Image (cartoon, rainbow, N blue to C red):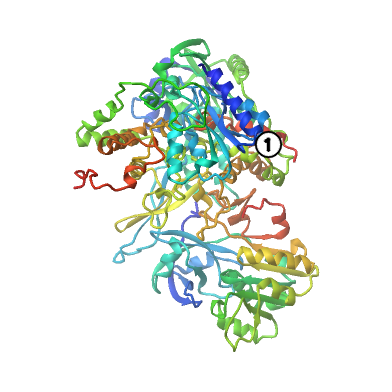
């Protein structure tokens, strides 16, 4: 771990140096909101932002991604046989990612990188990514990251943490990947580590104090999954839900996907697309039977997965980093903070 | 990095229409690359994703036994997009197989008395289990084997030639039944699977395991019968069905509580299911 | 009458209906957990009516919550909700006898996206007083004229009063007159075909196929939407622009002659897509071709549901 100082006057130059070595992604404001996108040469990330509308998960886990291709033309060799395709896994860097979003990749990794199976698409993209975090000095009112084992200056999942000091960034280099990134940019002004740490610590305390919303998760582990599943509050929680996919698509820790074939003339692809437990089709059997046929069942699944099944499966905290996107974007104001507290309190 | 989503290419070697309604066909598949057969090392009760280029994949229980070398067999019910396409295919066509997927519990079953209870087209993996246990190299590893297998009518029974052959053997007790029949020559049982189970299943002892596969209605009514016969819930093994895509516990759709049916199942003991939400 | 009085009256009527067991539940709104959002909710006990609220953040169309319900229901209905209730009744999604409609003459709902985009910093609190909206956030407080920050569909609404009700929560309002409802549609109609196409592409470029627009719409109650059909699969599942366009265009057509321009679709969209662009054109066509406005009468079927010898047909080529 090393601390350096990046004068903002050298920011643009550093990014230019990086451009050839990394595909750079950063927050950019379109006419409505901030989105993470690939930066073209000379394009600067807008680091004066609260958070992006959607999470940056799509940069590692694209909403639609081709897995294989094949030919259906029987006159061709190897027809009907699925072939892997070449993909660009050259180094990329996510500049300005918030600590909550960076932490989400650590949670999601558990799903894609298991002892038995490795998801090559997610893992290769993840491994090619340098996570350059931007500490959060102005958390939103819907942020509850400090309740989820995360926080506005949280470092897990980051290669590098940038702390905005006005005229300059303090860069806390956390991994060899972060070191490479800094070297490639050419930023090398050493800073007094003790003084810098002190500044960071003070800013961190200040930022954490600004977090205004909290959830209690301490009892979730002790609750019985069967009791929670049968709890009486699900009808009421689910009532407003319209079963759209907004919460799951906006969520940095939702990872479910669908696999589909698409054919154009004689060329076919097998692809995967984000899917959502909110959609009835998600669990519909070929016979027409659906074990999660009602809206209530689907809403319950989403919250139980994040707040109970995940907790039990990995013997850890909740599958949520407290970014607050689902709260801000839900068209009907279903609030995970309220649901989490209800579950945490429920004694059966 | 091994890509767990990439199917092994296989050639359809033979297609057998199993039932009188022609909705069930058995596909005998041969690996295009002999090395793949070795990689595809499986046990009865596991399943695979059959992959049809242009249509997609479908999880199907493996009907052949690992003791049967050189091919795989899958009996496929025609229900959805992929299975309908499969049913229209012919010998020589190329499809894909991905697996084997799911767990099995044969370590527990070794040396035990086995009661197999099956209904309808869910008999496929049970057929695999029977063929496996009856293999000369395996038979001594199991005590009594009882099989209760029912279908709507005689013409709806799967693997009829094999059933007839097993009937003649003295190292397996067959109790074949049909819901009803007007065939005067029918020489086996008539009655629903739960009823025949009550009459024919051996009483439970700690050495006895029941393997159940069938439609939900059959399972629903067979369970109380097994309770009555004293079967301990951790000695009842069932196979569940769910909509699946990845088959390897990653895509997220087939969970029951914290378990994924594709990876943590598809076989569960009833004792395990008792501790899971009834969402299947 | 001001919003607190609306709320008080809604609570009073709801408590009475529940106490007298005239209905099993009242469907309304409760105060949201974030600014400019209220949550649709139901109340079953008279003592719980205290949860109910009415203000300028009740833009979700509650008719959407009636589909195929079997209970006797009290429902809060602003003008557009009431028109969708009429449509629901005509389309047999609910029975008139099941409903006690608490009509709310509506002064318009505020546009969350518009107000949010007016400020650099996050908005922490919104309150309203008569025609003023007071916005507070870290380091700022500003008073806005409600009329300037209405949802676009509310701004041009000519049916603010419920068209069907059993009791009113407030006095009927004067309807807005001399409103040009279709200025934006005419602008698009005047575009060259290619420009139109590009414009639609641009509008839809951010769509994430979450289906919030469809699912917030009371008209979209098909048991299986065409985008979800797998045999045959009409539409691809990726974010391919062709598929995204197909979804939005076809959905709009499916709503032709039924859409009340309640704005629920646009309000629900997490990406801020102007979904009404498509439905509105068809709404205009229905008015011009058939003299039809959806949901005004229980006695008349929508024009695309019926045949009349003098139906216009010059658009059939």
Mark 1 packing: few (<14 Cα in 10 Å), some, or many (20+)?
A: many
Instruction: Give the percent coordinates (x, y) of residue C228.
Output: 43, 50
The residue lying toward the viewer, choosing from C111 and C45, is C45
Q: Is residue A272 above or below residue C33?
A: below
Residue at the image point whose x is 35% and y is 45% from the top: C243
Instruction: Give the percent coordinates (x, y) of residue A159.
Output: 53, 30
Residue at the image point whose x is 58% and y is 71% from the top: B120
Q: Is residue B207 above or below residue A250?
A: below
Q: Is residue B25 above or below residue C103?
A: below
Q: Which residue is mark 1?
A: A343
Quarter of the image holding residue C28? top right
Instruction: Give the percent coordinates (x, y) of residue A181.
Output: 46, 29
Q: Is residue B25 above or below residue C280?
A: below
Label 1 element class? helix
Q: Chain of mark 1?
A: A
Quarter of the image holding residue C10? top right
């Amino acid at each position: 771990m090393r601390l350096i100082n990046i004068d903002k006057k050298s920011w643009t130059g550093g990014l230019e140096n990086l451009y050839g070595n990394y595909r750079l992604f950063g927050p950019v404001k379109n006419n409505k909101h901030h989105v993470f996108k690939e930066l073209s040469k000379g394009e600067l990330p807008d680091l004066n932002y609260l958070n992006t509308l959607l999470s940056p998960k799509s940069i590692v886990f694209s909403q639609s991604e081709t897995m294989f291709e094949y030919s259906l033309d029987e006159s061709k060799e190897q027809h009907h046989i699925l072939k892997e395709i070449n993909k660009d896994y050259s180094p990329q860097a996510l500049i300005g990612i918030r600590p909550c979003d960076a932490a989400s990749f650590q949670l999601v990794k558990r799903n894609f990188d298991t002892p038995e199976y490795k998801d090559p698409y997610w893992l290769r993209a993840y491994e090619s990514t340098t996570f350059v975090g931007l500490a959060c000095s102005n958390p939103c009112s819907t942020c509850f990251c400090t309740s989820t084992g995360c926080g506005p200056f949280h470092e897990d999942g980051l290669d590098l943490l940038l702390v905005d000091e006005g005229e300059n960034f303090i860069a806390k280099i956390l991994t060899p990947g972060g070191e490479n990134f800094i070297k490639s940019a050419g930023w090398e002004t050493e800073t007094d580590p003790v003084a810098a740490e002190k500044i960071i610590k003070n800013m961190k305390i200040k930022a954490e104090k600004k977090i205004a919303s909290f959830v209690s998760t301490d009892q979730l582990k002790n609750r019985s999954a069967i009791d929670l599943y049968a709890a009486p509050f699900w009808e009421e929680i689910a009532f407003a839900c319209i079963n759209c996919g907004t919460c799951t698509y906006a969520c940095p820790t939702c990872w479910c996907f669908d696999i589909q074939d698409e054919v154009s003339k004689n060329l076919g692809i097998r692809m995967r697309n984000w899917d959502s437990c909110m959609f009835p089709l998600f669990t519909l059997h070929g016979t027409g039977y659906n074990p999660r046929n009602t809206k209530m069942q689907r809403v319950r699944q989403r919250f139980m997965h994040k707040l109970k099944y995940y907790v039990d499966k990995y013997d850890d905290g909740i599958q949520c980093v407290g970014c607050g996107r689902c709260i801000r974007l839900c068209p009907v104001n279903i609030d995970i903070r309220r649901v989490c507290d209800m579950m945490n309190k429920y004694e059966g | 990095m091994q890509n767990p989503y990439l199917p092994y290419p296989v050639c359809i070697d033979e297609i057998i229409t199993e039932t009188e309604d022609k909705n069930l066909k058995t596909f005998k598949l041969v690996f295009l690359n002999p090395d793949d057969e070795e990689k595809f090392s499986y046990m009865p009760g596991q399943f695979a994703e059959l992959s049809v280029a242009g249509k997609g994949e479908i999880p199907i229980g493996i009907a052949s036994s690992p003791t049967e070398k050189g091919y795989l067999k899958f009996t496929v019910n025609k229900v959805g997009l992929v299975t309908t396409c499969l049913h229209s295919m012919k010998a020589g066509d190329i499809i894909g197989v991905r697996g084997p997927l799911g767990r099995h519990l044969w370590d527990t079953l070794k040396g035990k008395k086995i009661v197999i209870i099956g209904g309808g087209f869910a008999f496929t993996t049970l057929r695999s289990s029977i063929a496996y246990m009856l293999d000369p190299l395996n038979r001594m590893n199991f005590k009594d084997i009882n099989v209760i297998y029912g279908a709507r009518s005689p013409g709806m029974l799967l693997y009829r030639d094999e059933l007839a052959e097993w009937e003649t053997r003295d190292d397996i007790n067959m109790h074949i039944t049909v819901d009803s029949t007007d065939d005067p020559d029918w020489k086996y049982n008539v009655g629903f699977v739960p009823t025949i189970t009550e009459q024919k299943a051996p009483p439970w002892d700690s050495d006895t395991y029941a393997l159940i596969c069938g439609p939900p209605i059959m399972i629903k009514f067979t369970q109380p019968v097994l309770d009555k016969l004293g079967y301990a819930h951790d000695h009842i093994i069932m196979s569940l069905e769910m909509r699946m895509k990845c088959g390897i516990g990653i895509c997220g759709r087939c969970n029951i509580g914290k378990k994924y049916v594709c990876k943590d199942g598809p076989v569960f003991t009833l004792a395990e299911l008792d501790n899971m939400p009834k969402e299947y | 009458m001001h919003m607190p009085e609306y709320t008080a009256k809604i609570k009073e009527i709801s408590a009475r209906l529940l106490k007298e067991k005239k209905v099993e539940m009242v469907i309304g709104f409760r105060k949201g957990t974030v600014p400019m959002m209220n949550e649709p909710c139901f109340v079953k006990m008279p003592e719980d009516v205290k949860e109910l609220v009415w203000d300028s953040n009740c833009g979700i169309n509650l008719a959407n919550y009636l589909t195929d319900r079997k209970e006797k229901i009290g429902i809060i209905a602003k003008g557009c909700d009431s028109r969708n209730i009429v449509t629901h009744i005509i389309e047999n999604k609910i029975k008139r006898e099941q409903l006690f409609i608490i009509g709310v003459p509506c002064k318009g709902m505020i546009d969350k996206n518009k107000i949010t985009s007016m400020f650099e910093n996050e908005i922490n609190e919104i309150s309203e007083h008569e025609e003023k909206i007071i916005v507070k956030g870290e380091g700022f407080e500003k008073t806005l004229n409600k009329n300037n920050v209405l949802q676009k569909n509310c701004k041009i609404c000519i049916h603010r009063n419920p068209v069907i009700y059993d009791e009113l929560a407030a006095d009927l309002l004067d309807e807005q007159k001399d409103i040009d409802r279709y200025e934006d549609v005419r602008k698009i109609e005047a575009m060259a075909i290619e420009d139109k196409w590009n414009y639609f592409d641009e509008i839809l470029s951010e769509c994430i196929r979450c289906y919030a627009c469809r699912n917030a719409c009371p008209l979209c109650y098909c048991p299986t939407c065409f985008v979800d059909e797998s045999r045959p699969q009409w539409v691809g599942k990726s974010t391919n622009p062709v598929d995204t366009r197909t979804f939005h265009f076809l959905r709009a057509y499916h709503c032709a002659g039924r859409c009340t321009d309640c704005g629920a679709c646009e309000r629900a969209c997490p990406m801020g897509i102007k979904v009404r662009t498509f439905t509105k054109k068809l709404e205009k066509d229905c008015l011009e071709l058939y003299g039809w406005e959806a949901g005004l009468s229980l006695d008349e079927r929508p024009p695309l549901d019926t045949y009349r010898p003098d139906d216009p047909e010059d658009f059939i080529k």
